[in-house]
Image (cartoon, rainbow, N blue to C red):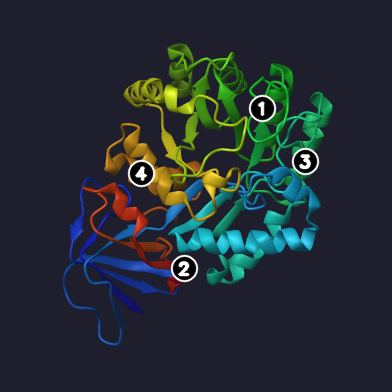
Amino acid sequence: MLAVRARSLFDGAGPGPVERPLVLVEGGRIVDVRAGGEPPAGAEPVDLGEAALLPGFVDTHVHLALDASDDVVGSLRRAADEELLMRMRAAARATLAAGVTTVRDLGDRGYLALRLREETAKDPAAGPRVLASGPPLTTPRGHHWFLGGEAEGIEAVRAAVRERAERGVDVVMVMVTGGDPTPGPDPYRTQYGHAELRAAVREAHRHELPITAHAHTVSGIAHAVAAGFDSIEHCSFVTDDEAGVHYDRRVIDEMVRAGIVASLTPGSLPGVPPPPGTARRIPEMIPEMIAGLAAMRQAGVVMACGSDSGTLPAKAHGSHPRCVTAMVDLGFSPLEALRAVTSTAARVCGVACHKGSIAPGYDADLVAVSGDPLTDITAVHAVRAVFRGGVRIV
């Protein structure tokens, strides 16, 4: 048994910190959480001093197969499977070191993330727990076509979803719109029609799998909502002409009614310019984004947070804390931002019964940071310790 002490604790859900907590861990799970007190006889003490203890972060959106270079497409296409798997292992370790103990990988090649899922299940130090989608569904030469998930037409889409179910994926990912960094003349266009999207949703749900949509534009988000997706990645409400953002209240209200979650992907490393042709007008859109996200919160849309790591140099693996601080920059409170990467993110990923909270019966996935992130969210950058399944990694 481990007896973990810290200055304070945020359990992933509650309104405020627990002062001078004592967390007892046995067999990889949390068995008790106390405010103060002495550990049981024989327990191994782990004193984290003045650190704040948080649930291990849950990243709802990563791409471990992408290397965050200026040429992610070329780099991936040149790599053989074993080389690519080695890169993914390194990406997983960097992600874990940043305090992320669970990831949802939403696009690999050749189902390599399923192999990594097995490796990290056996060895907590190898990386976070991996929830994998396999290659995302996309149209011929559509967004992320180079990952091998091209499918066009209702029957082909159904067959692609069935293949993923047979392979044992945890979630199905569909590229409803285009996006960066895939080259193309109209990167934000809607790629699939309603009939194809509805077929994908029905087939996924027939196999009891959640299904999520990559969607940037207003029309793409509306299509995904109408088709009944469980969550929407990015959900940025960019206008179809990319001139700005427009948070369509009718679409937002339908998301609330249907319980569709927005999996946001804000944040990037400072001082790293985007490759040419990407992130065209994001700085100019930020005031509109802040107002729109406030409207979504007020309406009751559930919002989680992912890093989208691997896709761009500014989204390197291990940069997940940047998306947490970016949420605060976009108008969320520190408490809301922390929930979005712990308990709410675990709920979005379907693992809320044992991840994303510090409570008896939950996996002992913990991260300790210097400072108090409930008053200064930048504390999440100062990771002092990471535990996965009760094993101290950092």
- For label 1, the residue is 178
Q: Is residue 38 left or right of residue 28?
A: left
Near mark 2 (Cα within 10 A), the count class, few <14, some 14-19 or many ≥20, is: many
SS of the residue under disc 2: loop
Residue shown at the point (81%, 58%) measured from the top left: 80
Give the percent coordinates (x, y) of residue 86. Answer: 69, 64
Near mark 1 (Cα within 10 A), the count class, few <14, some 14-19 or many ≥20, is: many
- For label 3, the residue is 146
Q: What's the residue type where badge 3 is placed?
A: Phe
In the depicted structure, whether residue 155 falls above or below residue 133: above
Q: Nearer the viewer, residue 20 or 275?
A: 275
Q: Earlier in the sequence, mark 4 or mark 1?
A: 1
SS of the residue under disc 3: helix
In the depicted structure, whether residue 295 falls above or below residue 358: above
Q: Are marks 4 and 2 in contact (CB under 8 Å)?
A: no
In the depicted structure, whether residue 389 falls above or below residue 304: below
